[in-house]
Image (tube, rainbow, N blue to C red):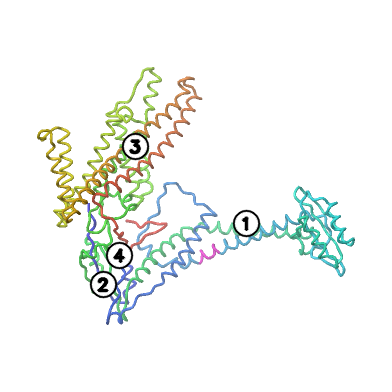
């Protein structure tokens, strides 16, 4: 597979055809409109940027999404975990009918929800008032009265532990024309009423401060506490009734949820066209646009544009434009699974190599060896197949499901090679029943053959890294950098071959590894070929250090294949041993079977969860750091054509 060949398109059409042209382009789904470069001279005076109603449409979309969220919160939709999105024809997304009505419906729902929130705030306020009034129920005075012609009245609280003797004594020092009484008390506060003449009011307030006297929030309310409580109860009942009615109205509107969702998807299409319109320029009578399209889709575009009075042209991008060319990867069912990995890292630059077919076999094989369990593999395969059949996923979701399926197959094969089925649960059962030590047949075991597995992991690493070097070698030759390819990648291969021959004692003269020495000399000459004088020496020293440490570190990174294979298997064995212990000591009975099932399921669920994530992360590291570092040129911009993309509905294909 390769990076899709792109062409630049420039188009000028009649302004009256703008809306129809945009609708045809979004149906086609293969043209990405780009910003027009700033014009100079006469063209700058003739053209102007197009404006659109994109901002207004975004506001309308926000209203629709808000209404759907309110309905989802009020009446959660009952649907299966694996229910796919509904599919509709592209024409349905481009229809204008129903959007206005859906916006009116959304405003109605949002209005009711806002009223509910206001009522909830009022309810909280009334309940707070109710709580503050209850301690004062025995008080028969009007709460709105805080003074008479000659006296002042205060209602307040002090902490429950406050001594009334001390409080009265403090007031007596100020004046004998002030009196304070307890209305009620509880564990936290004493609720007091204080009456004094106007002349000593300020002194009384000062005397009360040391006792943490706080004014009661009920002061200023109309009527007696009992009357105020009655009004509060009536208000709460009215609020509860209105809230119930509003909730019922919102729930009754949930049957129109799909209407709101479809209108939201229609607005998404409108917004996409409006944003495309903003990238155009216009004169009095025509519109001007430019963009990118896959070369393979040029005929489809030509057939659409044949019905317009327009002028258009396409051309291949120049090498100077490669950094700006959007990237789309052409994949089959196998390599498409790695799109998720590539997108997480970075797309390749246009004009370089597509990493997916080069990465796919290594990623899947490495994952299978790290996970290496037939039971886990079967779970992954089953989950992927069910998701593919039920959800009908697309784009990154499809890539994830495909990758889960292929890695599940590799995990099952890895488990078959190592004799692991939920680690060693079968072996432990057979051993317990027969009394004879037994193990499943295997080709190699990370526990028994850990040294061999480690060497095998490192050899896989050498193959992986050299594949990346081979890709880089070919790319350099294609770019005319043959000398660089020979002096850099070529010298390393000579060193590798020389090291193997030296180890096998082949081609050595008097014990001297001639081929290895030739490779080292090539590497040193290549490192200093563009340097002068003493710079050749420093370049050679730096090359030896960087090559030795770099390759040693890269190759040793692949020891994680063995480490993860070993870790997952050993943890699984531990859980199996703990789960089967009650059967070994107490025999097989319903209780020991139940204990086994609980420990087995919990233990392997945890082990499976840790391994499925850990193997993915470490496999990703081997690809993105070690492998990609040998050949990959990242930084590509994704190809994002003008196309219909629904949040709640898929376009029928």
Position in image of residue 37 (x %, y %): 29, 72
Work out how far the residue at label 2 is from the one at label 1, CA to CA, in angstroms: 58 Å
Work out how far the residue at label 1 is from the one at label 4, CA to CA, in angstroms: 50 Å
Q: Which residue is mark 2?
A: 11
Say which label, 1 or 4, has the lower sequence index.
4
Farthest-out residue, front? 534
Q: Which mark is residue 32?
A: 4
Identify the secondary structure beneath mark 3. helix
Image depth: mark 1 or mark 4 in front: 4
Mark 1 neighbour density, 10 Å: few (under 14) some (14–19) many (20 or more): few
The residue drawn where x is 43% and y is 68% is 57
Tell me whether circle 2 and circle 1 mark residues in contact (CB < 8 Å). no
> What is the count of numbered marks?
4
Per the picture, the main secondary structure of the magenta-coloured stretch is helix
Up-down relation of residue 544 to residue 592 (above or below): below
Q: Which residue is mark 3?
A: 371
Foreground of the two, 457 or 118: 457
Work out how far the residue at label 3 is from the one at label 4, CA to CA, in angstroms: 41 Å
Q: Is residue 259 left or right of residue 351?
A: right
Identify the secondary structure beneath mark 4. strand
Identify the secondary structure beneath mark 1. helix
Find the magenta span and give its range. 104-110
Say which label, 1 or 3, has the lower sequence index.
1
Q: Which mark is residue 244?
A: 1
């Amino acid at each position: 597979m390769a990076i899709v060949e792109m062409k630049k398109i420039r188009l000028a059409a009649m302004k009256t055809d703008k809306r129809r042209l945009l609708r045809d382009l979004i149906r086609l789904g293969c043209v990405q409109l780009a910003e027009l470069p700033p014009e100079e001279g006469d063209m700058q005076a003739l053209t102007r940027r197009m404006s659109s109603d994109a901002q207004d449409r975004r506001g309308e979309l926000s209203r629709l999404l808000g209404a759907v969220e309110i309905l989802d919160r009020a009446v959660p939709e009952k649907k299966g975990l694996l229910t796919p999105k509904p599919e509709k024809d592209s024409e349905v997304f481009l229809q204008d009918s129903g959007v206005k009505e859906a916006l009116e419906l959304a405003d109605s729902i949002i209005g009711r929800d806002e009223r509910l929130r206001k009522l909830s705030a009022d309810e909280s306020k009334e309940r707070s008032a109710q709580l503050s009034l209850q301690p004062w129920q025995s008080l028969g005075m009007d709460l709105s009265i805080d003074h008479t012609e000659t006296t002042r009245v205060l209602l307040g609280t002090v902490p429950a532990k406050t001594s009334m003797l001390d409080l009265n004594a403090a007031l007596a020092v100020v004046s004998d024309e002030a009196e304070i009484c307890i209305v009620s008390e509880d564990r936290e506060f004493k609720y007091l009423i204080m009456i004094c003449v106007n002349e000593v009011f300020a002194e009384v307030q000062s005397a009360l401060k040391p006792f943490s006297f706080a004014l009661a929030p009920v002061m200023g309310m109309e009527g007696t506490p009992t009357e105020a409580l009655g009004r509060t109860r009536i208000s709460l009942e009215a609020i509860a009734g209105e809230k119930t009615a509003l909730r019922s109205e919102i729930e009754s509107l949930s049957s129109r949820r799909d209407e709101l969702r479809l209108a939201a998807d229609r607005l998404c299409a409108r917004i996409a066209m409006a944003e495309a319109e903003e990238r155009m320029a216009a004169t009095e009578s025509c519109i001007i646009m430019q963009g990118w399209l896959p070369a393979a889709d040029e005929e489809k575009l030509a057939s659409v544009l044949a019905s317009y009075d327009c002028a258009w042209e396409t051309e291949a991008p120049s090498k100077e434009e490669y950094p700006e060319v959007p990237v789309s990867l052409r994949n089959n069912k196998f390599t498409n699974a790695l799109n998720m990995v590539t997108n997480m890292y970075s797309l390749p630059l246009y004009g370089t190599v597509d990493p997916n077919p080069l990465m796919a076999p290594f990623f899947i094989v490495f994952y299978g060896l790290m996970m290496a369990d037939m039971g886990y593999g079967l779970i992954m395969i089953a989950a992927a197949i069910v998701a593919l059949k039920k959800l009908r996923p697309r784009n990154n979701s499809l890539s994830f499901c495909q990758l889960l399926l292929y890695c599940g197959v590799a995990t099952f094969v890895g488990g078959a090679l190592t004799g692991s089925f939920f680690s060693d649960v079968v072996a432990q059962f057979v051993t317990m029943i027969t009394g004879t030590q037994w193990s499943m047949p295997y080709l190699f075991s990370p526990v028994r053959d850990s040294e061999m597995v480690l060497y095998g992991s490192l050899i896989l690493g050498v193959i992986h890294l050299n594949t990346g070097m081979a890709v880089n070698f070919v790319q350099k030759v294609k770019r005319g950098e043959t000398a660089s390819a020979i002096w850099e990648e070529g010298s390393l291969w000579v060193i590798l071959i020389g090291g193997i021959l030296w180890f096998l004692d082949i081609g050595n003269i008097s014990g001297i590894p001639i081929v290895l020495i030739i490779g080292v000399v090539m590497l040193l000459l290549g490192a200093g070929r563009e340097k002068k004088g003493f710079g050749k020496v420093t370049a050679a020293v730096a090359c030896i250090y960087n090559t030795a440490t770099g390759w040693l570190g890269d190759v040793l990174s692949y020891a994680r294949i063995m480490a993860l294979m070993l870790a997952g298997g050993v943890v699984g064995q531990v859980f199996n041993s703990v789960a089967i212990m009650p059967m070994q000591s107490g025999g097989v009975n319903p209780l020991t079977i139940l204990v086994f099932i609980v420990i087995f399921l919990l233990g392997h669920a945890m082990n499976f969860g840790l391994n499925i994530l850990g193997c993915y992360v470490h496999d990703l590291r081997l690809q993105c750091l070690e492998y990609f570092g040998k050949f990959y040129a990242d930084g590509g911009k994704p190809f994002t054509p003008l196309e219909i993309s629904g949040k709640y509905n898929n376009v029928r294909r």
